[in-house]
Amino acid sequence: MKKTILTGLRPTGNLHLGHLFGAGKNYLAMQEDYEFFLEIADVQALTDNFHHPEKVRKNVLEITMDLLAIGLDPKKVHFFIQSRIPEIAELTVFYSNLVTVARLQRNPTVKTEILQKSELFGNHGESITYGFLGYPVSQAADITIFDGELVPVGDDQLPLLEQCREIVRKFNSIYGDILKEPEQVLSNTTRVKGLDGNEKMGKSLGNAIFLVDSEDVVKEKIMNAVTDPNKIRKDDPANPDICMVYYYHNLVNKGNIDTVCKECRNGTRGCVSCKKELIHAMNEFLKPIQERRKYYEENSSLVKQILEDGSLVAKKRAEVQMKRIKQAMQIDYDEK
């Protein structure tokens, strides 16, 4: 039997290059060798958008179309909507008894996100909700309700997976050897930097190229990308290692990367011409993704059916696991 992989994405907006190179490429490889459950985590998205549920609902379809457009195959991947699997919420409640508030507050990933929210809203974390603080518990339920053995993660998400393993160990110590401890599958791609040179490309940072960006939008963004500040004139030599234009050439224009680097260093390549070449390469790179996406946009009923079918498979799997869990917890009152 194939090992089970579980991963999830919050539907908070369209996918960008960071998602594609940081996770999507791995997904494409893993769909061939594992039983792959891919969760559209709408419940977790509500932790930031509880007053705007219409955004989350719209983005469920948007992000699914993005994932299909990069090449994920619904015959190999079970796409499902988190809220369609009530067993996840039920298991989250059970797990909430196995972890302290203090432990959640010490989670490095949670601490970082609370700090980011504090800096953004200036409230020093006072508006952090119970749902946000407890989302690592919900993620543990996501993984274990499907008996997930492998979880694709980046370095910044390792504390969340360790939190899950702690919950599994605590549960098993009380109720018996019921749950599997999931193992991480680390991305072989480093985090993609933003157009502004930030170590992270992100929607909220305004430094991302999205997979749905039009040619004009791509042009505008790349023309404003950060380059070597010491290159004042066209013929000045520059350092490509600190130039974001060169950085993106290395992602989507590898066939010409040696020439780009050499000409940049010896001063025979101007920044404008370099950006124009990148614009062309980027649009060519995005073109097949956008063509596939257009097909799904024109066949939205197919996308909804893919989510329906995947959610049915996920629901059946979750029901079996929940039955085992309730038996172990001695709350299987409907059993005779």
Image (spheres, rainbow, N blue to C red):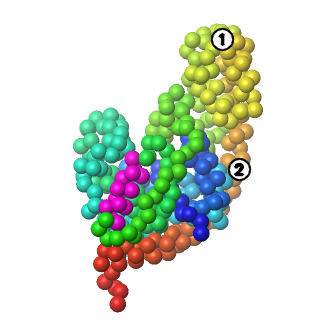
Q: Residues within 10 Å of mark 1 (few under 14, many from 20)?
A: many
Residue 73: name its quadrant: bottom right
Q: Position of residue 162 (x, y in %)?
A: 39, 51
Res 237 label: 1
Q: Amino acid at mark 2?
A: Glu
Q: Nearer the viewer, mark 2 or mark 1?
A: 1
Q: Which residue is mark 2?
A: 291
Please, what secondary structure does the residue beneath circle 2 have? helix
For image coordinates 47% across by 52% down, the residue present is 10
Q: Position of residue 243 (x, y in %)?
A: 59, 22
For image coordinates 25% across by 54% down, the residue present is 100
Instruction: Name the magenta segment's main secondary structure.
Output: helix
Residue 208 against residue 312 in the figure, above or below: above
For image coordinates 65% across by 66% down, the residue present is 75
Residue 257 against residue 265 in the figure, above or below: below
Q: Amino acid at mark 1?
A: Pro
> Position of 222 compared to 116: left or right?
right
Q: Position of residue 168 (x, y in %)?
A: 37, 61
The boundaries of the magenta stretch are: 159-172
> Position of 221 compared to 111: left or right?
right
The residue closer to the viewer here, 112 or 295, is 112
For image coordinates 53% across by 72% down, the residue present is 312
Q: Quadrant of the N terminus?
A: bottom right
Q: Based on the picture, tell me whether residue 170 belongs to the magenta stretch.
A: yes
> Position of 185 compared to 277: left or right?
left
The residue closer to the viewer here, 144 or 116, is 144
The residue closer to the viewer here, 286 or 156, is 156
Q: Earlier in the sequence, mark 2 or mark 1?
A: 1
